[in-house]
Image (cartoon, grey):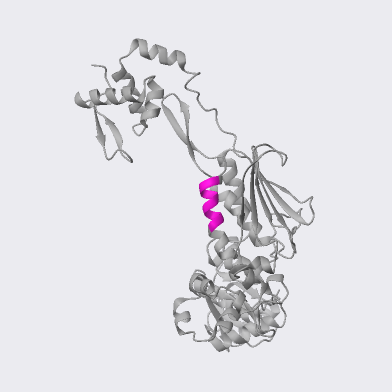
């Protein structure tokens, strides 16, 4: 990080491609664009860039007070999800005559081009601007010199014929690049893909990320690139298999399929009676939490292995296992507070498509949703070393009312002491959207009998129907026994 003496020298100099000054502490777009431009290091000098907050154009402090809140605000620029790939920054404050100065130090990225809100920003001398297609190509070629992650490497044996280009051009590209820039971009498809790290011009090949995200048949190159769902009738793998389904194909399509499956199958809601007159909607597993865990497995797994992601549902729990343990700086002792990315290009694509949000916050959200739903916290196991396992217990449901057994005495009392019309009025007063079968269960009549009672109540003006049979409700006009 910069020292105080170095800071004073830079403040005394003019703005260059390495220095930007601002009085503002609230212009979030300006800060994001500046960090993005420094990370791209267009001159390829290999030196950090500096954003100085709290100084005027001449480098004089403006009387700002550097609070903890301000320091946290500028540190959050790194991981708020608007700058991708995530830049490396440091933030510190210095007290000078005339006020405090906050310094944001930005290191050159080894994965350019870096984008802020889907635009590639660079510095040309003291001026900040949007990169031209030619400048984006220069940045992408620089990245090709030093690809380090698996998803950035060229996929040997593959070609553009193995890529669903329509999927890339129509489903992904408009979400990844600003519309104005896209409209003016007349480069060939290879250059467009390269600017997003999906093509390696040095080898003339699509990258592993391109094949996994948009490939016509990703498993031809990566046999384990799918998610295997299995539902067991008991608590272990020896139980009867109730259902199974492999989710395969390009990740871009697989994500939507899994999202819908979780909503309609895993997190399906159902009505449950909690009293003789009231029901609630319950789910064994909250959608948001399970979705986050499965999406994390797809994002972080090791695609060089042959085994799929295991998404297993038992009678009492869910288990999700992705092959490839914790990566980089992430360790069992600092999980989930420290994260690293085995597949940063795939992670960026999933962010663009809306399947992951701000980095390093997902697990906290998962635990909160699970506890609120009665599942308890998810358990994470690192014992498998080469795999990562998450377990989620089935929700501890509140006791459900068995109307056929638990309330027989109450029903008998109601039947003997109240008319059918009055019993039904009490039921409708508690729940005016109750279905006919539930009414019949609550007051001890057949469905046909309930219909007759409803007809009598409507004829006597004690209730009326608001809206259609499906989606409407009953309005109780008089609940007093006549």
Quadrant housing the C terminus = top left
Question: Which image quadrant is residue 303 in?
Answer: bottom right
Count of number-bearing discs: 0
Of 36 and 481, the residue lying toward us: 481
Q: Position of residue 199 (x, y in %)?
A: 63, 79
Q: Position of residue 128 (x, y in %)?
A: 53, 83
Q: Is residue 259 magenta?
A: yes
Q: Is residue 130 magenta?
A: no
Q: Is residue 366 left or right of residue 423?
A: right
Where 479 sits versus 160, above or below?
above
Residue at image point 71% right, 83% down: 145
Of 119 and 297, the residue lying toward us: 297
Where 435 sits versus 3, above or below?
above
Q: Is residue 224 left or right of residue 114?
A: right
Of 256 and 195, the residue lying toward us: 256
Where 159 sits versus 25, above or below?
below
Where 458 sits versus 83, above or below?
above
Question: Which image quadrant is residue 157 in?
Answer: bottom right
Quadrant housing the N terminus = bottom right
Residue at image point 79% right, 50% down: 383
Q: Position of residue 299 (x, y in %)?
A: 64, 61
Question: Which image quadrant is residue 104 in?
Answer: bottom right
Is residue 356 something that shows in the picture? no
Q: Which residue in the rendered view is the most extreme toward the top?
A: 416
Secondary structure mainly formed by the magenta segment: helix
Q: Position of residue 317 (x, y in %)?
A: 65, 41
Residue at image point 29% right, 32% down: 474
Is residue 203 something that shows in the picture? yes
Image: magenta residue range:
257-265
């Amino acid at each position: 990080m910069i020292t105080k003496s170095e800071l004073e020298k830079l403040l005394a100099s003019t703005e260059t491609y390495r220095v930007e000054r601002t009085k503002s502490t609230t212009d979030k777009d300006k800060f994001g664009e500046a960090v993005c431009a420094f990370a791209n290091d267009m001159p390829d000098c290999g030196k950090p860039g500096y954003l100085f907050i709290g100084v005027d154009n001449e480098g004089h402090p403006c009387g700002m007070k550097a609070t903890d809140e301000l320091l946290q605000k500028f540190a959050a620029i790194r991981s708020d999800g608007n700058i991708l790939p995530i830049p490396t920054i440091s933030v510190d404050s210095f007290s000078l005559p005339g006020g405090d100065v906050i310094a944001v130090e930005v290191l050159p990225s080894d994965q350019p081009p870096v984008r802020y809100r889907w635009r590639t920003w660079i510095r040309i001398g003291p001026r900040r601007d949007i990169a031209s297609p030619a400048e984006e190509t220069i940045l992408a070629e620089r990245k090709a010199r030093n690809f380090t992650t698996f998803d950035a490497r060229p996929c040997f044996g593959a070609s553009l014929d193995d890529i669903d280009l329509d999927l890339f051009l129509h489903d992904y590209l408009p979400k990844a690049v600003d519309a104005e820039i896209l409209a003016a971009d007349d480069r060939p498809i290879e250059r467009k893909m390269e600017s997003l790290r999906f093509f390696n011009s040095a080898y003339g090949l699509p990258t592993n990320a391109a094949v996994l995200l948009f490939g016509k048949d990703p498993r031809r190159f990566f046999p384990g690139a799918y998610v295997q769902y299995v539902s067991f009738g008991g608590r272990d793998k020896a139980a009867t298999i109730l259902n199974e389904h492999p989710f395969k194909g390009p990740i871009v399509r697989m994500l939507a399929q899994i999202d819908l499956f979780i909503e309609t199958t895993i997190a399906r809601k159902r009505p449950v009676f909690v009293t003789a007159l009231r029901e609630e909607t319950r789910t064994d597993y909250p959608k948001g939490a399970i979705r986050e865990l499965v999406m994390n497995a797809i994002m972080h797994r090791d695609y060089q292995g042959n085994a799929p992601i295991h998404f297993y549902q038992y009678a009492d729990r869910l288990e999700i296992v992705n092959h490839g343990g914790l990566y980089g700086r992430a360790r069992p002792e600092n999980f989930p507070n420290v994260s690293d990315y085995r597949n940063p290009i795939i992670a960026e694509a999933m962010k663009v498509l809306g399947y992951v949000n701000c980095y390093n916050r997902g697990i906290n959200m998962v635990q909160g949703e699970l506890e609120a739903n009665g599942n308890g916290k998810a358990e994470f196991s690192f014992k498998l070393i080469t795999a990562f396992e998450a377990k989620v217990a089935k929700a501890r449901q509140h006791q459900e009312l068995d109307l056929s057994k638990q309330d027989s005495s109450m029903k008998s009392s109601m039947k003997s002491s109240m008319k059918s019309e009055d019993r039904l009025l009490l039921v409708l007063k508690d729940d005016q959207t109750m279905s006919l079968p539930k009414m019949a269960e609550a007051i001890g009549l057949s469905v046909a009998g309930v219909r007759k009672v409803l007809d009598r109540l409507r004829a006597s003006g004690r209730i009326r129907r608001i809206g259609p049979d499906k989606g409407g409700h009953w309005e109780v006009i008089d609940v007093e026994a006549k």
